[in-house]
Amino acid sequence: MKLKQLLDVQLIAIAIIWLFHVSGIIGILYGNSQWFVAATPINLSLCFFLLLLVSWKTSGFVKIAAMSFVVGMVAEILGVNFGYIFGSYEYGEALGWKLFGVPLLIGANWTILTVCSAAIAAQLYDRLIPRIVIGLGLMLLLDFMIEPIAPILDFWEFEGGIAPSQNYIGWFLVALPLQFLYHYWKVELKHWFAHHLFLLQLLFFMILLLQINTLQNLL
């Protein structure tokens, strides 16, 4: 794919995810809340597909994408069925088809978060340790923001209604080797799509978190 074609694809992909996320925020808070929450699998699937589309030719990307998907799914399956790693929780119906109680889109989300956070960290630092620390911090930050509203959106819910400290420790332990492998395999994304996608997810859940009382009344 020539540079100009790649840039065109990237710009279109970035425009699409901005449109979907902004529409989602407005739709959930001020429109047909149930419909927009039900459309979550479409939005997440689209983001995953676009990330693959603009990145698949990058050296090492397919390996880290596949590894993140598999490791994320295995960790979540152990968590949901045995209470290992993250604590005792279960998934709702909002995220679509499940494998052993875990939505397949959760594997896609592990890929998205790993790649996007590591790509941002790689732009900020040249050394491995700071890159891993920043990548882990970004992943944990996003999870911290999602947890309070996940039950409201029917994503997932922990026993007792609140994510335990074990959840964040589990996230750290699962994400650490994935962050390391991203840089070990020298994945160098030549686009800004991953940065936009992470920023949009952060803004999306930040706004919903700030409007959590409104959200509870709507859903």
Image (cartoon, rainbow, N blue to C red):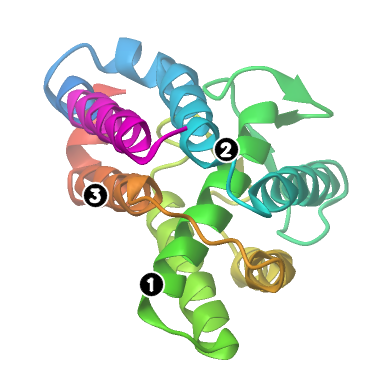
- Residue 203, which numbered label? 3
Residue 103: x and y, percent?
A: 67, 28
Mark 1 or mark 3: name the one nearer the start of the chain: 1
Magenta stretch: dominant SS? helix
The image shows residue 60 at horizontal and vertical percentages of 68, 54
- Rate crowding at label 1 as few (under 14), some (14 to 19) or many (20 or more) other CA atoms within 10 Å: few
Residue type (three-letter) at the residue carrying disc 3:
Leu
Q: Would residue 195 appear left or right of 66 to someone viewing this image?
A: left
Q: Position of residue 191 (x, y in %)?
A: 37, 50
Q: Nearer the viewer, residue 95 or 66?
A: 66
Nearer to us of marks 1 and 2 is 1
* 23 on left or right of 157: left
> Which residue does the numbered mark 2 point to in the structure image?
156
- Mark 1–mark 3 distance (CA, rounded to whole Å): 20 Å
Q: Quadrant of the C terminus?
A: top left
Residue 20 falls within the magenta-colored stretch: yes
> Which residue range is magenta in the image?
1-23
User: Crowding at label 3, few (<14), some or many (≥20) Cα neighbours within 10 Å?
Assistant: some
Residue at the image position 83 percent from the left and 46 percent from the top: 74
Element under label 3? helix
Cβ–Cβ below 8 Å for labels 2 and 3? no
Under circle 2, the secondary element is: strand
Q: Percent position (x, y) of residue 22? A: 18, 31
Query: Which one is nearer the viewer's eye here, 146 or 121?
Result: 121
Q: Quadrant of residue 144?
A: bottom left
Find residue 123 and name its label: 1
Q: Residue at x 27, y 49 (%)?
A: 209
